[in-house]
Amino acid sequence: MKNEQFNNRDVSNEYFMVDIQDYPTEPWDKFKRTLKRTFRIELFVGLWVVMREMIRFDIHTVSYPEEKMPIGPRYRAVHEMKRLWESDAERCIGCGLCEKICISNCIRMETKVDENSRKEVSEYTINLGRCIFCGYCAEVCPELAITHGGEYENASEQREHFVDYAAMLTPLDKMKAGAQQEFEGFGAITPHEDESVKKTPLSY
Amino acid sequence: MSKITINIDGKEVQTQEGEFILNAARANDIFIPAICYLTRCSPTLACRVCLVEADGKQVYSCNAKSKDGMVITTKTENIEKERRAIMEVYDVNHPLQCGVCDQSGECELQNYTLEMGVDTQSYSVKDVDRSSHDWGHIHYNSGLCIVCERCVTTCKDMIGDNSLKTIPRGADALEAEFKETMPKDAYAMWNKLNKSVIGLTNGTDTLDCTSCGECASVCPVGALVDTHFIYKSNAWELSQVPATCGHCSAGCQISYDVKQTSISDPSDKIYRVMNEWNYVSLCGAGRYGFDYENKVESKDAVAFASAIEAFKKADTIEFTSTITNEEAYLLQTLKEKHGFKLINNEAKSFQTFLKDYSEISGTTLYGSDLKTTMNSNFVISLGTALKSDNPNARYSLNNSMTVNKGAGLYFHPLQDPIIEGLGKSIMSVKHAPLQEEAALYLILDLFADKEKLPAKVSDYLATFHSEKTITVEETIKEKVVEIVKEMKVNVETGEEEEVEVEKSKMVPKKISKEVVVDDNALLSIVGADDNFMETLEKNLKKKDSFTMMVGPDLYNHPNSKNIARLVALVEKCSDIELTMIPTLTNSLGVALICELDEEAGEYSVGYNTKGDFTLSALGDGDLDMPAINQQEGTLTSVNKRVNPTNAALEYKGYELNDIANELGMDAQNVIDYTISLPTKVGFKAQAFDNLPNHYENDGSEVRGYLLDNVEVEISVNQDVEAFSEDKLEGTLIYLANPVRQFTDFTNKATNLDEIAGLYMSEEFLSASELNEGDSVRVKSNRGEIVVNIVSDNKIAGNIAVLPTFDSKINSEALFDGYRFATASIEKE
C-alpha cells in the first residue's frame, strides 16, 4: 500500500472518534478550568482510601526491603552459571555463543587450553550496566550453563557494574546440598523432548 | 592453449582448453561443491563431492578437463543422492562438540552438511581410537579429521616438505550390505576414508619441517590447529585487517585477525594470521611472526625533540629495507631538501645490480615474476639460498615440479636437503663460491640461442668444448642357437624317445663401444656430476617454458657488474624468463625510490639500524617508531607489485612523518605520499585508498598495482668479461638465515623460536671435534665473533651458516659484502 492510499483509506468502520474538548485559549476560561480542577472532591476520595486501608492494618503492599516477593521461575534477573548434577563441574564449555548473540555486547569471555587439553573458561564477565536482560544468552546456551536467576538487586554507584564468572557460579556447598535450582525460562528444555529426537545409528 | 566455450548449467562460459571444469566454473561464479581440491595443486580425488555430469557422463570436475562445446550439469538427481550420502559418511562418528572446536563455524563439514540437507544419518561403523597428537607447532586431532588430504596435498604440491602422509587407521571393514545399498561413489569414498588417517612421514610424533603451518590453514575442519591458537578465540570474534606481510620480498597477502587483548585490556591484539590459501601460501614467518609490534604507551616529546635536534645535526641517514615505499620516498625528499646522505648497503648493491642489468636488457626491471615461475616447467635458481631468502620462490619451484611435471637446476655452494628433497627432477649443482659467473656461462651455453648471442660470447663458450672419446658399455641382445635334447612321444610307436631339437633364443650381452662425445669443460668447472648432461637431457624432455631466479649472492659478488650483464644476456638470448629476488622486504622499492650513497658522513641517524641517533621500531632506539604491522603504506614485492598494507594495531607514538613535518614537509599521514611515488621509475600516481587488496575467484591477483617496466637506453658497450677463476676454499661461512627468520622483527615474534648461532650440518659436526652448544670463535680476515654452535638438519655439507636475524650476533662483521667468506672456527 502506498503512503497516499494509506492516509486516505476509509476508517469509518474500525475507529470511533473520542470527543476531546478543545483546550481553553482565553485567560478567563483557563482560570475557570483551574478552579474546577482544584476544588473537585476526587482528591479527598483518594485520601480516604489510603486512610481506610491504613486503619484496617490489612495492607497488601509488600514491605520491601524487609519482605520480598517470590520471583517467578522464568524471571530474568542477574545471570547464574550452573554446575553439572553428576560431577559438580562447571557446565560452561566456553563455546562463546552467549558472547556472540548478546545484542548489547555486554558479555566477554577468555578461554585457554587447560592441562587436560580441554577448553577452559579463564575469564568471564557480564557488564550489567549494559545488559538489557533479554534472555538470549540463556536461550542460546547449548549446555544450560548460563541462565537467569532471581537476584534483581544490582544497584551500583557506577553505571558499569560487572559480574564475573566466580560470582555467577553456583557455590559448591549449595551444589553439595542439592540446592541448585534449574531455570525454567528461556532455553530450558521442554518435558519429553528426548522422545522427539531421531537417534543416530551406532555400530556398537 | 586456446580459448574455448563450454556450457555449465545453461550458461556459456569462456575458458582455456584443458582447464579443469571446477576451476572454469569457479572463475565464472558457478558453484560446484568441492572439499579436497586446492587451486594450484594437483587433484586429490578424496572427497568426490565435485561430481558433475559432462556430456552425459559423470566425472569429477576437479580433474576433468574441459573440451570445446562441452555441456555440463552440476546437479542431477543421482549426483545429489551421491553428495548427500558423502556428507552423511563424513558425519559418521564425527564428534558433535562443535562448541569447543577451534574451527568455530569456519567449518566446511558444517557448511556442506547443511548445504546437502543432511538431517538424518543412515550409516554407521565402529570407531577406533583416534586421539589427538601434539606435533609441535601443529596440533592434530584425528577424531575431527575427515581425511580430505588437503594438508598432504599442499605439503607435497605447494610447500615441498612432504612431511605428511596418510597412515592406516586400523578400523573394521565396512559392512557388506552398504556396498549394495549405498550410492557408488559415496561407498568408494567411505571405503578409502575408513582405512586412513593423517600421519607424519618422518615416523616420529613431532613435525620436522620448515614449519609453515599451511597444513593447518587449509584444514576444512578443526583437525589441524596451530598450537599457539588452541582455544584462544572463536573465529567470529576476530576482525580481519587485510595487509601485506612485511618479512620478505614475496609480499604475500595476509589478514591479521585481531580482537581485544583481554577483558581488562581493550586494546587490539593480533591472534593469528590467515591467508587465501587457494591463491597464496605463507611461510612460517608470515604465519607465526605477527607480534613484532612496537608497544608505545604515549608520545615521548623529549625523545622527539632530541630526534629533531639529531636530524638537524646529522648529515647521514642509515636505514634498512624493512620500510614502506612512502617512508623511502620521505627519506629521499629529505635528502633532496636537506642534503642527507642515504646509506643502505643492501639496497644499494641491489640498485647497482639492477642498473648494470638494465644496461644490457634495456629495461629497469627483470621481466618475470614468481607466478610465471610457478607456471613454467623448467626452473633455474642461481645465487640464492632459496628456502630462506624467499620461501615463496621455493614454493614456486616446487609447484612447477610437482604440478607441471617440471624440472629444475639449483646452483648453490651450500648443500640443501630441503631443496634436494623437492623431487628427483631437481638437479643441484654445488659450485665453489665466487664461481657464479661460470655457472651463468654454463646456463648460456646450455640454453642460449647461439645465433642471438654476441659473437664474442659464443666464441668464448666454444673454447670450453672439445671432443673426447669415451668407452661406453652397452647391452645388446644376441641370437644364440643351441641344441637341446627333449623327450618326445614318437607318433608311430607311441613310445617316448629322446630327440635333438634346435632352439634359438635372445641373450643379453654386454659390449664395450668407443664413441666420440662432446666434452664441456664448464661442467667440471662448476662441479656438475659426471652424468649431468644425461640427466639434464632426460629432464628437458617435454619442457617448453623456462624461468630463472637469481638472488642476493649475486648482488654483493665482487664481480657483480659482469654478473648482472650475464644475467641480462641470459634473459635476452634465451627463452628463459628472469626473476630477481630482492634481499629484504622492500629492497626493490628502496632501490627504485632512493638515491643511495656509498659513504656515510660524520653524524648519522639510524632508522631500524644503529646510528649516532637511532629511530627504532624494535623498541631499542632513542625514539620509537611503528613496526610494519602498525603502519599503513605500500611495499614493493618480488613480483614487481606495489602492495598496500594496513595497520593492524594502534601506534601511539611518533612516526617518521611527524619528524618530516617538523623538517619542513607537510602531510597528515604518510600515505598521502603514495600518489607521489616516482612515476619515472614505474610507480603509478594512485592514491593509497584506491589500492585494492584481494584475489578474484579465478585466482587473479587484484592487489595494488604492477610497476611499469620502464625502458632505458642500452649501453653502447655490450661486452661481458670472461669469468674469473677465483674461488673460495677452506673452511667457509655463509650469511643466511634459517627458514622463518629474516630480520630482528621475526626474531622478536614469540612463536618463532629459532636460536641464533653458527649453524652447522650434522655431517659437518660429526666430522669435526665440535658439538652442538659449543661456544666458538669465528674469525675471518674482516673480523671475529664468538657464537654458539647450533646443529641444523636443514643444511648439509661443509659450509657453516651465520644468521642476520639476531643483531646481537654481528655476523656481517665477518663478511666483505659477498655472502661467502673463508674463516676459521675454533673452540673457545
Image: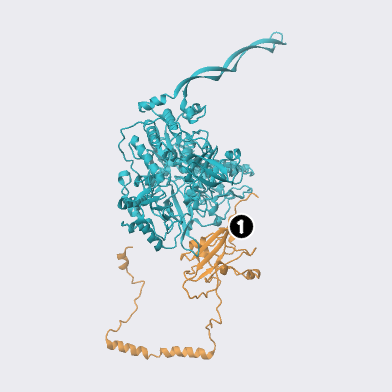
Chain colours: A orange, B cyan
Residue B26: quadrant of the picture = top left
Q: Is residue B52 visible?
A: no
Q: Amino acid at mark 1?
A: Glu
Vertical placement of residue B276 versus A3, above or below: above
Q: Is residue B445 left or right of residue B679?
A: right
* Residue B431 or residue B628, whichever sits in front: B431
Few, some or many residues within 10 Å of mark 1 (<14, 14–19, 20+): few
Q: Nearer the viewer, residue A105 or B157?
A: B157
Percent position of residue B34, x then y: 49, 45
The residue drawn where x is 36% and y is 88% is: A37
Residue at image coords 59%, 58% = A114
Q: Nearer the viewer, residue A199 or B774?
A: B774
Farthest residue, direction left: A26
Residue B722, visible in the rendered structure: yes
Rendered view: B662 above or below B643: below
For the residue pair B691 and B524, the one nearer the viewer reads as B524
How many labels, in total? 1
Q: Chain of mark 1?
A: A
Determine whether B435 is above or below B216 in the image: above
Report the residue that reaches farthest toward the top.
Answer: B492
Q: Position of residue B744 (x, y in %)?
A: 47, 51
Mark 1 sits on what residue? A115
Q: Secondary structure at mark 1?
A: loop
User: Percent position (x, y) of residue B294?
Assistant: 45, 57
Image-quadrant location for residue B99: bottom right
Residue at the extreme right of the image, as rendered: B495
| Horizontal and vertical percent position of residue B332 | 33, 50
